[in-house]
Amino acid sequence: MNERTPDTHTVLDAITLANRAPSVHNTQPWRWLLGDETIHLMADRSRGLPATDPDGRDLLVSCGAALHHLRLALGALGWRAIVHRLPNPADPDHLAAVELAPKTPSTEDITLVGAISRRRTDRRRFSSWPVPDGHLDLMVRRAGKAGALLVPVTGRITRRQLIRAIDQAAGAQDHDPAYAEELATWTGRSRLSRDGVLTTSTLPEQHTHGDTAMRAFPVGTLPDAETGRGERDAGELLVLATTDDDLVSVLRAGEAASAALLTATHLGLATCPLSQALEVEDTRSLIRAQILDDVAFPHLILRVGWAPIAAPPPPESHRRATSDTVEYLPGTRHTP
């Protein structure tokens, strides 16, 4: 970097926060290339999931979340990220080129950056407290600002249709040996693991919270949250979508997922991204037709609600060392 841009240590601090972004099975399928004046986000296909995510949508959504985390981190540190998405048509793995310029940190930057270290994927049941409409509205607005639609599924009929699609997708994947092998590879990790899903982050068996069946993992030790006797789970479901289905749109969906999840975390809500129903083309098509009236393409479902008062936060999933995710472009002058 040079006098008009932050020093390398500042950039690495921002990347460390960006690497906290959620990703499918915590695969962290990205890498960063640093130049003197630019940061480049690259897809790391070696960390993809061909059985779970055959078209690479989950991978792109994950990378989009990391890009949004980076923008927030840089903004809170006083630098505006000028993002050029898919800057090289000849290289679809070159997802973004980021230029930097000084700026005054916004309240939103600081607020959402503060939520990065507190955000967790919480696969446990939620309490019966309803999520205020104002909270959902703020998530919707911030997702829209990031470039995607976030649609709360609050109608009784549409919710039932969405739940049916989730169930059908789970059934389809359960009969796929390649999916089972891939799931076993990336889950059941020990506390020392720097990627993948920890055993302590998943429930010991398949659970249905209220009407919503969660993805079944082969190994898990996370105890379910204690709630009152007979208390219902009031978790809300929101579908994240875009009006187009090209690579830039899917990347923006990931950015919007980051904005919505961090907003929910700041508001005190528990969150859990659900991608399973969008990993099977038939059920993705059902959601597009039945929930979105064929006017938008779904990429992710967000489950949000209040964790029970007595429930401790779920364990933190570790991330790879920042140095393992960063490379320097040839000729770069400023390196640590």
Image (cartoon, grey):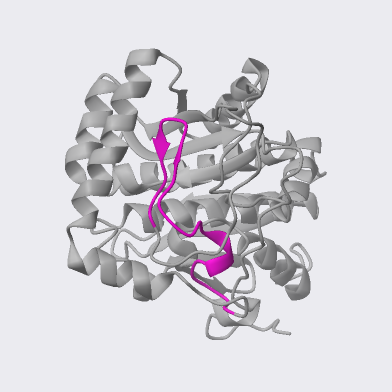
Q: Is residue 135 visible?
A: yes
Q: Is residue 326 visible?
A: no
On the image, the x and y values in percent for residue 116 come to 70, 52
On the image, the x and y values in percent for residue 324 come to 57, 82
- In this rendering, is residue 154 above or below 185? above
On the image, the x and y values in percent for residue 192 come to 62, 80
Front-lying residue, 40 or 301: 301
Residue shown at 26% from the left, 18% from the top: 293
Residue shown at 31% from the left, 70% from the top: 182
Q: Quadrant of the C terminus?
A: bottom right
Residue shown at 66% from the left, 18% from the top: 134
Residue shown at 40% from the left, 60% from the top: 217
**134 sits to left or right of 178:** right
How many numbered discs? Answer: 0
Front-lying residue, 245 or 313: 313
**262 sits to left or right of 6:** left
The reply to whether the magenta stretch includes residue 55 is: no
Span colored in magenta: 193-216
Main SS type for the magenta part?
A: loop
Q: Quadrant of the N terminus?
A: bottom right
The reply to whether the magenta stretch includes residue 211 is: yes
**238 sits to left or right of 331:** left
**127 sits to left or right of 91:** right
On the image, the x and y values in percent for residue 242 come to 37, 33
Place residue 326 in its image quadrant. bottom right
- In this rendering, is residue 112 above or below 175? above
Front-lying residue, 209 or 83: 209
